[in-house]
C-alpha cells in the first residue's frame, strides 16, 4: 500500500464510524444539483479535446478518452437521465472518473460544484413511486438549503452498458446438489436495480432470501428474529454501503454489537469497489466485501457460508438458533 492510499483511508475513516459520507456536488444541463460519493471518484478532469467515438453503442456514450494510459468510456450522465446533452465539443465541461464494481467509467457533467459532508440520517429516500420509476435514489440539502439529488447510478449503468446477470452453471449445480433452499439470506440495498439483480442471483442459486430497501428495515427484521417464538433465521447478511438513513458501515457495527446476531456472517456488497472500502469494511467488522454486479462472487460467498454451517452442525432454520 502506498502512503497516499493510507492517507486517503485515514482522512475519511472516521466517516465510516459516524454514519456520514462526503460527496462531490455537480451540475448537469438542467442546472439541478447532484451528488456523488467521493469514494467512487478517482479524479475530476476537464473534458479532453480528443474523444474517440465508439460505433453502435448507447447514445449516452459519447466515446472513450485516454486517462492515465487506459481507455475509459465516457457517459453523458444527463443524456442517461433524458436531459439535454452537454456541449463538450464547443463548451467547457468536465468528466468525473469513477470506479464502479471494479470497472472505471467517466461521467460527463456540466461542471463540478463543491464538497459536502452529510450524515446519512439527513439523506432521505424519495419514496417508492419515484425510486421505482425514476433514477433518484436519495435526496438531501446543502448548507444553503439547496436540494442535492443522489442518483441511482447503478440503474443508469445497467441500462446503458449492462451488467452480468448469469451465474456459472457449475455454481448452480453446486447449489442444487447442496439442497440449500432451507437457508435464508437477508439482503439490503436502496437501489431497485441492485435489489433485482441480487434477488435474481439468489433465486437462480436456489437459496431463500428476503431483501429490504433500507438498513432500518433490515435491522428490525434481525431484531424480530431474536424474539421468543420466532422461526425466522438468517444464514448470511448481504448489505449495500450507501443507503439513506443508515449506511452499511453503521448497520454492520450495530449488528456486530449484538451477541445474538454477531456470529451471522455479514458481507458488504457495494459498487464502491476500491481497496480503501475493503479496508473500511474490515474496520467496522464485516466478514467479507464483494463488489456489486458479480453474481458468481455472490454465489460463491453464499455456498461457502452454507458449507461452513453444515460443518459446524447447523442447518436450515437452525443457522442462528
Image: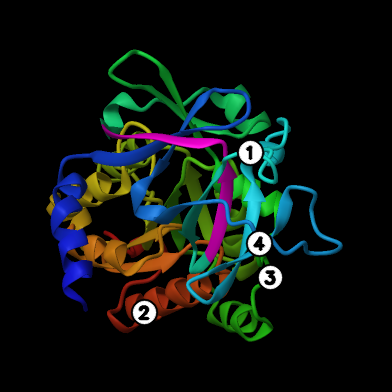
**Magenta residues (range):** 104-117
Camera-near label (2 vs 4) is 4
Mark identifier at residue 166: 3
Which sits in the foreground, 193 or 223? 193
Which circle's residue, 1 or 3, is located before the other in the chain? 1
* Left or right of residue 203: residue 1: left
- Magenta run includes residue 174: no
Is the C-beta separation of discs 1 and 2 under 8 Å?
no
Characterize the local packing of mark 2: few (<14), some (14-19) or many (20 or more) Cα atoms within 10 angstroms.
few
Label 1 sits on a secondary structure element that is loop
* Left or right of residue 61: residue 173: left
Q: Which residue is mark 1?
A: 91
Which circle's residue, 3 or 4, is located before the other in the chain? 4
Estimate the spatial distance between the alpha carbons at disc 3 and disc 4, rounded to whole Å. 36 Å
Q: Residue at horizontal 34%, vertical 63%?
A: 318
Characterize the local packing of mark 4: few (<14), some (14-19) or many (20 or more) Cα atoms within 10 angstroms.
few
Query: Which quadrant of the rendered structure holds the C terminus?
Result: bottom left
Q: Which residue is mark 4?
A: 50
Estimate the spatial distance between the alpha carbons at disc 1 and disc 2, rounded to whole Å. 61 Å
Estimate the spatial distance between the alpha carbons at disc 3 and disc 2, rounded to whole Å. 26 Å
Residue 58 in picture, x, y percent from top left: 79, 53
Is the C-beta separation of discs 3 and 2 under 8 Å?
no
Which sits in the foreground, 142 or 238? 142
Which circle's residue, 1 or 2, is located before the other in the chain? 1
Mark identifier at residue 310: 2
Residue 112 in picture, x, y percent from top left: 44, 37
* Left or right of residue 277: residue 125: right
Which circle's residue, 3 or 2, is located before the other in the chain? 3
Which sits in the foreground, 109 or 154? 109
Amino acid at each position: 500500500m502506498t502512503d497516499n492510499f493510507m492517507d486517503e483511508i485515514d482522512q475519511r475513516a472516521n466517516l465510516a464510524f459516524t454514519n456520514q459520507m462526503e460527496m462531490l456536488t455537480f451540475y448537469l444541463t438542467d442546472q439541478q444539483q447532484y451528488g456523488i460519493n467521493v469514494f467512487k471518484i478517482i479524479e475530476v478532469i476537464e473534458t479532453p479535446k480528443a474523444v474517440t467515438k465508439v460505433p453502435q453503442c448507447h447514445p449516452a456514450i459519447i466515446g472513450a478518452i485516454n486517462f492515465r494510459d487506459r481507455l475509459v468510456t465516457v457517459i453523458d450522465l444527463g443524456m442517461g437521465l433524458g436531459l439535454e446533452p452537454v456541449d463538450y465539443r464547443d463548451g467547457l465541461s468536465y468528466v468525473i472518473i469513477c470506479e464502479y464494481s471494479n470497472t472505471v467509467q467517466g461521467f460527463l457533467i456540466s461542471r463540478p460544484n463543491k464538497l459536502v459532508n452529510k450524515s446519512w440520517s439527513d439523506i432521505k429516500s424519495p419514496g417508492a413511486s419515484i425510486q421505482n420509476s425514476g433514477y433518484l435514489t436519495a435526496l438531501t440539502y446543502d448548507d444553503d438549503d439547496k436540494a442535492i439529488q443522489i442518483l441511482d447510478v447503478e440503474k443508469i449503468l445497467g441500462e446503458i452498458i449492462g451488467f452480468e446477470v448469469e451465474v456459472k452453471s457449475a455454481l448452480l449445480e453446486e447449489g442444487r446438489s447442496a439442497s440449500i433452499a432451507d437457508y435464508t439470506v437477508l439482503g439490503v440495498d436502496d437501489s431497485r436495480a441492485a435489489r433485482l439483480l441480487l434477488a435474481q442471483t439468489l433465486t437462480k442459486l436456489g437459496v431463500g432470501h428476503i431483501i429490504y430497501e433500507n438498513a432500518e428495515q433490515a435491522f428490525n427484521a434481525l431484531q424480530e428474529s431474536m424474539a421468543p417464538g420466532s422461526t425466522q433465521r438468517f444464514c448470511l447478511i448481504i448489505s449495500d454501503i450507501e443507503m439513506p438513513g443508515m449506511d452499511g458501515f453503521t448497520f454492520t457495527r450495530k449488528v456486530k454489537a449484538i451477541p445474538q446476531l454477531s456470529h451471522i456472517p455479514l458481507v458488504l456488497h457495494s459498487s464502491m469497489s476500491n481497496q480503501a472500502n475493503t479496508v473500511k469494511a474490515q474496520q467496522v467488522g464485516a466478514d467479507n466485501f464483494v463488489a456489486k454486479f458479480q453474481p458468481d462472487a455472490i454465489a460463491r460467498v453464499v455456498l461457502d457460508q452454507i458449507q461452513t454451517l453444515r460443518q459446524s452442525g447447523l442447518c436450515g432454520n437452525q443457522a442462528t438458533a
